[in-house]
Image (spheres, rainbow, N blue to C red):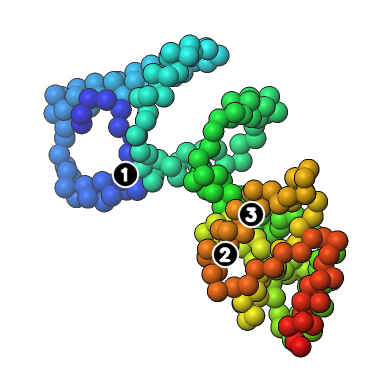
Amino acid sequence: MANGAYIRTEEHKQKMSKALIGKNKGKKRTEEQNKRNSEAQKIAQNKLEVKQKISEANKGKKRTKEQRKNISDSLIGRKLSKECCEKLSKAHQGKKLSIEHRKNMSKASKGKPKSDKHKQNMRIKAAERVEKFGTGPNFTPEAVVYFRQFDLLNNTNGIYKDPETNQREFLIKSIGRFPDYINFELKLIIEIDDSGHFDIYGNQKIKHILRQDEIQELYPDFKFLRFKKEEMHKLLEYCNNKST
C-alpha cells in the first residue's frame, strides 16, 4: 500500500474480497507484512487527524484579499470529475443556508458582471426548476380568455397557461423561454405586454426585444405578434381579418 490515506469504496472492497477468496487460505502474514500494514494504517489515521485539526484551526479565520486571490488563481482551469461533482451535489442536498449566509452570498455577487452566456445558463436552469415544480412563470390572467376565444374561432389548440385545464406554457428549453402563446399548427407566437415591458418613455425594453429575437431565431417561419395588455381585443380582430 502506498504511503498516505486511500479510501476505498464499498464496491471496491467487495471486489477485492471476492478476488481473494481461497487465495490466501491457510497462509499467515509475516511479521514484516504485519508491521508494514500497521504503519500504513497509522499514517492514514494520522493524516485524517491532521486534516481535522487544520479544518478546526481554519474555522472563522478571515483570509486577506491577496490570499483569496492566490487561492482563486490556483483553481483557475481546474476541472472536477463527474464523480466529484455528484458527491458535492449530494453533500449540499437538503442543506439550509441561514439568512445571514444568503445575504453574504447576495452581497458578494452584486455588481459582478455576468456574460450573456452566463445569464442564459442561469435563465435555462431557472426555467427548468419552474417546469419541474409546476409553478410556471408570471402570466396575464386576462389573456387566457382571449387565447381561448382565438382557438375557438380558429378551430385550433395553442399552448398557453390555462389554470382551468392545468395546461402550462410551452418551455423552449435551449434558451429557457416561455412564450405567452404558441401554436405549431398555425405557426404563430403571441406575446402580451403589460406596463412592465416598457420604459418611462413608452418604448419596449431592450430585454424584451432580445427575448423576441431569440425566439424568432429558433422559429423563423413562425409569425410573431405582440399586443399590449389593454389592446388584447386586437387579437380577435386579427383573427377576423385573417379569415376575410
Depth check, front residue: 181 or 12: 181
Q: Residue at 32% of width from left, 39% of height from top?
A: 8
Compared with 83, 71 (above or below) is above
Residue for badge 3? 209
In this rendering, does residue 121 appear at all? yes
Q: Give the amino acid type for the residue marked by disc 1 in the picture.
A: Lys
The answer to whether residue 29 is left or right of residue 110 is: left
Q: Residues under labels 2 and 3: Cα distance?
A: 11 Å
Which label is found at residue 13? Answer: 1
Which residue is labeled 2 in the image?
216
To which quarter of the image does residue 173 belong? bottom right
**Sequence-wise first label, 1 or 3:** 1
Nearer to the camera, 221 or 32: 221
User: Is residue 78 placed above or below 134 in the rendered structure?
Assistant: above
State the image coordinates of residue 101 (x, y, percent, origin top left): 64, 26
- Labels 2 and 1: the sequence-earlier one: 1
Tag 1 secondary structure: helix
